[in-house]
Amino acid sequence: MPKPILVLAIGNESRGDDALGPLLARRLGDWMRAANMEGRVEIIEEFQLQIEHTLDIKDRELVLFLDAGQGTCAPFSFQEARAKRLDGHTSHAVAPETLLGIHAMVHDVTPPPAFILCVAGVAFELGAPLSSLAAQHFEEAFEFCQQLFAGPAPHPWREMARISVNSEAQDEKS
C-alpha cells in the first residue's frame, strides 16, 4: 500500500524559479524527517506531470501538488484541484486538474482530494539561478506547508484554501 499522502513537486532546476516545487519538496521532506512525520507522506519530484502519474495518485487519501508559477499572486496561491476532463490526447505535460480527471477515467473512481500550492516566481530562463524574490516566496510557502502538515486532512486544507482565495480576492481589490 502506498503512503496515504502524496506530494508531487513539479519543476526544472535548470530554469531559475521553476525550481521552487522541487526545492520546496526537499525542504519539506527534511522537516518531516526531523519531526518524525515522513511515515505517512511520499514525495515525488518531476519536471512535469504526465498521465502515468495517475498510478502515483491511486489509493491516496490526499495529494499536494507543488509548483512555481508566472503571474501567480505573491507569495503563493493555494487551492483545491478539481478533476477536469482531458481535451485531446497527449502524453506530455498535463495540468493537475487534468491528471485527476484522467485518474477518474482510468481507475473508475473519484480521485483523492488534491490541492495545488503554486509559488510565485519571476525568472524562468534557462540557466538562471533562483531569484531573490522567489527565495522570499519560498520561505513563506514553506511556513505555509508546515501549517498544512500540522493537520493533513481534506477539511482543514479546504478551509485554508478558502481563506487563501479570499485573501487573494482582497489583494486584487486593493
Image (cartoon, rainbow, N blue to C red):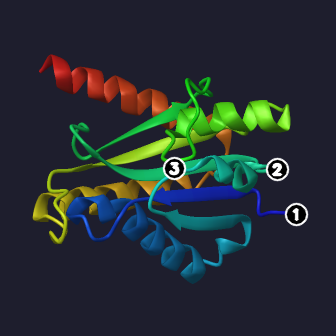
Out of 80 and 128, give the one closest to the viewer. 128
Q: Name the residue tied to disc 2.
A: 59
Q: Amino acid at mark 3?
A: Phe
* Secondary element at image label 3: strand
Q: Amino acid at mark 1?
A: Met
Q: CA distance from mark 2 to mark 1?
A: 8 Å
Q: Is residue 79 left or right of residue 81?
A: left
Q: Name the residue tied to disc 3.
A: 65
Name the residue located 59 percent from the left edge and 67 percent from the top edge.
43
- Lower sequence index among marks 3 and 1: 1
Name the residue located 77 percent from the left edge and 63 percent from the top edge.
3
Residue 116 horizontal/vertical position (percent)? 48, 42
Res 40 quadrant in image? bottom right
Location of the N terminus (image quadrant): bottom right
Out of 139 and 70, give the one closest to the viewer. 70
Q: CA distance from mark 3 to mark 2?
A: 16 Å
Out of 157 and 48, give the one closest to the viewer. 48
Location of the C terminus (image quadrant): top left
Residue 162 horizontal/vertical position (percent)? 46, 27
Name the residue located 14 percent from the left edge and 56 percent from the top edge.
123
Q: Is residue 82 left or right of residue 124?
A: right
Q: Name the residue tied to disc 1.
A: 1
Name the residue located 65 percent from the left edge and 52 percent from the top edge.
53
Q: Answer few, some or many: residues within 10 Å of disc 1's Cα (few below 14, many 20 plus, some between 14 and 19).
A: few
